[in-house]
Amino acid sequence: MVKRHNYWIVLVTFIVALMLTAMPLPDWITVWRPAWVAMVVIYWSMALPQRVSIGTAWFLGILLDVLQGSLLGQHAIGLAIVAYVTVKLHLQIRQHPLYQQSLFVGLLVAVYLSLIVWVNGIIGRPPQSWSFLMPVITSMLLWPWLFVILRDVRRRALIS
């Protein structure tokens, strides 16, 4: 079997995650928006830790900062920490069933969002409520489906 190197598909998944993050939503559901970019970074850091890790997460974080008009480096440091933890623990995480992986993803997304809120607090924009943690719940609920979709994409493209 010949291995193909279709790594452009990984790039496409990151672009789709950025688009889902930028997509306008009604006000009542905006607080529930999943952390799409963080979840895709977690998946690819687990699946391809030697190719997608801290540097990729940092770059995506900078793009997310520019996209959302936030403090430059704010999302970058959060995603880099998420990628670091995922790469360090990827062998252990992959052994667990999807519902346990969802708990791990929820924990990582909570750390990521807490870092963003912490940086916002330092620059004088504290959160108005605890609603900033709502994406943790939606990310946990969507993780099994995102995992299956990205796994199938990776297998069909023969990315390894």
Image: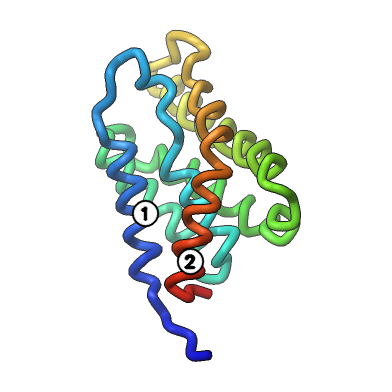
Q: Residue at x 37, y 19 (%)?
A: 29
Q: Residue at x 32, y 49 (%)?
A: 16
Q: Residue at position x 33%, y 37% from top?
A: 21
Q: Give the number of the disc on residue 46.
A: none
* Cα gap from disc 1 to disc 2, whole angstroms: 13 Å
Q: Position of residue 95 (x, y in %)?
A: 75, 57
At x 67% / y 36%, what residue is drawn?
Answer: 103
- Nearer to us in this view, 69 or 135: 135
Considering only vertical position in the picture, is 12 above or below 82? below
Image-based side of 7 in relation to 154, left or right: left
Q: Nearer the viewer, residue 54 or 1?
A: 1
Q: Which residue is mark 2?
A: 154
Residue ranking furthest to the top: 128
Q: Of callouts 1 and 2, which one flags the residue occurring earlier in the amino acid sequence?
A: 1
Could you tell me which secondary element the residue under label 1 belongs to?
Answer: helix
**Callout 1, which amino acid?**
Phe
Q: Amino acid at mark 2?
A: Arg
Side (left or right) of 8 relative to 141: left
The spot of residue 28 in percent (x, y) is 35, 13
Residues packed near mark 2 inside 10 Å, few (<14), some (14 to 19) or many (20 plus): some
Image spot of residue 36 (x, y percent): 42, 41
Q: Which residue is mark 1?
A: 14
Between 129 and 117, the one lying in front of the other is 129
User: How many other residues sit within 10 Å of disc 1, few (<14), some (14-19) or many (≥20)?
Assistant: many
